[in-house]
Image: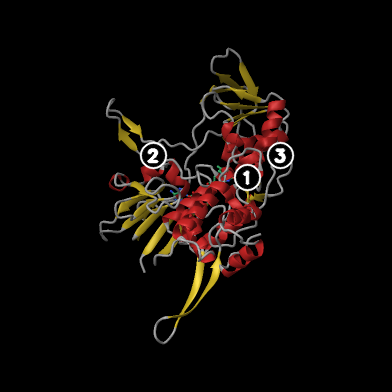
């Protein structure tokens, strides 16, 4: 059996493992993904939007981030699901092994080599790169010298701060830089331990708008910072160590802010020249051969429009999941003649519930990799009789998640449920379901998708005289459990 290697052991790897069925033996290398390292915390969405393929979809839960975080999925529960899937496919015993180079095999033409160091490598038929968003963007200019004897990092990147509880030192003043959802999480934790805190975002960038996503989870912390005038639209130009403290210089001001710890959370560094960027890990003949794998069947939008992954011409090396939407390569600008990074590919997410429309978020990972692998979350048992014709069919599993399913998955589901409808009517129901679940009314339950009640009402608006009981029966016949 040919072997496929997945580099990375996070959400993208888990989704790829559970949605591919093309006869490859698939193994995984790399440490557990982001969620295994973070302190347990409510995630940005309720469980039905963080559903991993291959398991029954959780019931629709309407989370209200302003009042309570109870219905948001806990990161520990989510990670358990990822680890369960990945653990059965790990290659070797050392999960911290990193792939340092990917090349074409000279001894086995057509195959690829993943190098752990200059003398240890794995030769495989296919490589799937699922390495996530990669390195984080660097901080602004740092000057001066840290004072000795301080037992926390005075300047630290946001994810490192979240990962390391020893950094949550009480009674020190903090400054947080960046306006994303991750920065809001940092602010949430920092606010518990800091007598004084400032939250900066660069004016003219995404400002604090990124912090609003995902969903209303961050509303409480944003409100707290607004009420206490802790939010500042300033561009930090320099962080200076002065004695045991930090002076934070901002653009166009002749004064500075003072803090003990500066935490920056500025998103993934998409500059391909950064060391460790996956662009640097691939040999030039591989990376120059990469092009977008388009959504040929229109699973996530107009046919051939969305990018599901990147792949070499033989699809021997592919980049999938969050790594796809943060990948840039170097190209030559025709006017200036200078080498510049290419633009990032936009993530196909407009068909997802508004709360899940995060370009490198889990719902996008699930939807894009499922569509790439033409995954249909329904299994059936077919029994042949002695004349080799089908004697019996039974649906043995139906894990379709109405809120994350792509157009093909919904079309199969509706065809099973409503065999009296024409192909056009099925398509109409698919499109209406997608549109209804991706409404954007802020502050409403709609941002989390379509509830069972909404879904039933939608079906009733398209199929005359169908009752709730009859829809229940159709769901049951198709093996779909909705709650
Ligand atoms: C703080 C934070 C909060 C977030 N909150 C949410 C949220 O609430 N909801 C949501 O939908 N999304 C959220 N996201 C985004 C979400 O975490 C990502 O969508 C998801 O982790 C992407 O999964 P991935 O498998 O592609 O990458 P990752 O989870 O980052 O996994 C990448 C894997 O690749 C491995 N790796 C990297 N390079 C190499 C190499 N050279 N060799 C071997 N292995 C390698 C890493 O060790 C890791 O195992 C959040 C992101 C951050 C940073």
Is disc 2 placed on a helix, strand or loop? loop
- The residues bearing labels 3 and 1 have C-alpha atoms spaced at a distance of 15 Å
Return the x and y of residue 478 as percentages of the image width and height: 56, 67
Is disc 1 placed on a helix, strand or loop? helix
Closer to the observer: label 2 or label 3?
3
**Residue 290 to residue 343: above or below:** below
Q: Residues within 10 Å of mark 3 (few under 14, many from 20)?
A: some
Return the x and y of residue 357 as percentages of the image width and height: 54, 43
Residue at the image point whose x is 66% and y is 59% from the top? 483
Colour scheme in use:
secondary structure
- The numbered mark, 1 or 2, whose residue comes first in the sequence reads 2
**Residue 358 to residue 154: above or below:** below
User: Which residue, given by chain and number where applicable, does mark 3 sit on?
Assistant: 66
**Figure quadrant of the N terminus:** bottom left
Residue at the image point whose x is 46% and y is 36% from the top? 269
User: Which residue, given by chain and number where applicable, does mark 2 sit on?
Assistant: 328
Q: Nearer the viewer, residue 216 or 252?
A: 216
- The residues bearing labels 1 and 2 have C-alpha atoms spaced at a distance of 34 Å
What residue occupies the far front of the structure in this picture? 465
Quadrant location of residue 229?
top right
Return the x and y of residue 453 as percentages of the image width and height: 66, 54
* Residue 245 shows up from this direction: no
Is disc 3 placed on a helix, strand or loop? loop
* Residue 16 shows up from this direction: yes
Q: Nearer the viewer, residue 457 or 337?
A: 457
- The residues bearing labels 2 and 3 have C-alpha atoms spaced at a distance of 37 Å
Quadrant location of residue 54?
bottom right
Asked whether the beta carbons under mark 1 and mark 2 sit within 8 Å of each other, the answer is no
Residue at the image point whose x is 45% and y is 59% from the top? 423
Closer to the observer: label 1 or label 2?
1
Answer left or right for 169 relative to 32.
right
Mark seen at residue 446: 1
């Amino acid at each position: 059996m040919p072997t496929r290697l997945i580099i990375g052991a996070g959400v993208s790897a888990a989704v790829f493992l559970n949605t591919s069925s093309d006869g490859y033996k698939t193994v995984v290398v790399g440490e557990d993904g982001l969620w295994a390292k973070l302190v347990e915390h409510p995630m940005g969405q309720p469980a039905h939007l963080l559903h991993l393929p291959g398991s029954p979809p959780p019931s629709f839960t309407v989370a209200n981030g302003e009042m309570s975080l109870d219905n948001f999925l806990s990161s520990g529960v989510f990670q358990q699901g990822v680890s369960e899937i990945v653990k059965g496919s790990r290659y070797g015993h050392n999960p911290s092994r990193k792939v340092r180079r990917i090349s074409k095999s000279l001894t086995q033409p057509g195959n690829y080599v993943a190098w752990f160091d200059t003398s240890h490598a794995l030769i495989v038929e296919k490589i799937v790169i699922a390495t996530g968003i990669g390195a984080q963007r660097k901080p602004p200019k740092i000057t001066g010298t840290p004072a000795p004897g301080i037992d926390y990092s005075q300047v630290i990147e946001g994810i490192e701060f979240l990962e390391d509880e020893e950094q949550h030192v009480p009674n020190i003043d903090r400054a947080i830089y960046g306006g994303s959802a991750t920065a809001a999480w940092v602010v949430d934790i920092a606010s518990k331990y800091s007598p004084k805190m400032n939250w900066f975002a660069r004016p003219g960038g995404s400002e604090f708008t990124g912090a609003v996503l995902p969903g209303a989870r961050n509303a409480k912390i944003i409100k707290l910072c607004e009420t206490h005038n802790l939010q500042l639209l300033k561009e930090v130009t320099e962080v200076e160590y002065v004695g045991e403290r930090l002076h934070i210089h901002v653009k166009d001001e002749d004064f500075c802010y003072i803090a003990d710890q500066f935490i920056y959370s500025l998103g993934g560094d998409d500059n391909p020249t950064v060391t460790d960027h996956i662009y640097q890990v691939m040999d030039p003949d591989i990376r120059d051969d990469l092009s977008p794998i388009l959504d040929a069947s229109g699973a996530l939008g107009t046919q051939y429009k969305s990018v599901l992954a990147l792949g070499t011409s033989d699809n021997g090396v592919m980049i999938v999941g969050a790594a796809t939407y943060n990948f840039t390569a170097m190209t030559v600008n025709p006017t200036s003649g200078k080498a510049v990074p290419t633009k990032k590919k936009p993530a196909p997410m407009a068909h997802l519930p508004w709360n899940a429309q995060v370009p490198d978020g889990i719902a996008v990972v699930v939807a894009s990799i499922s569509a790439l692998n033409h995954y249909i979350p329904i299994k059936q048992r077919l029994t042949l009789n002695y004349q080799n014709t089908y004697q019996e069919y039974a649906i043995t599993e139906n894990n379709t998640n109405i809120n994350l399913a792509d157009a093909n998955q919904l079309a199969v589901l509706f065809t099973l449920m409503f065999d009296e409808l024409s192909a056009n009517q099925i398509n109409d129901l698919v499109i209406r379901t997608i549109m209804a679940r991706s409404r954007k009314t802020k502050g409403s339950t709609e941002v989390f998708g379509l509830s069972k009640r909404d879904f039933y009402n939608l079906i009733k608006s398209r199929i005359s005289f169908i009752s709730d009981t009859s829809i229940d029966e159709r769901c049951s016949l198709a093996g779909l459990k909705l709650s």
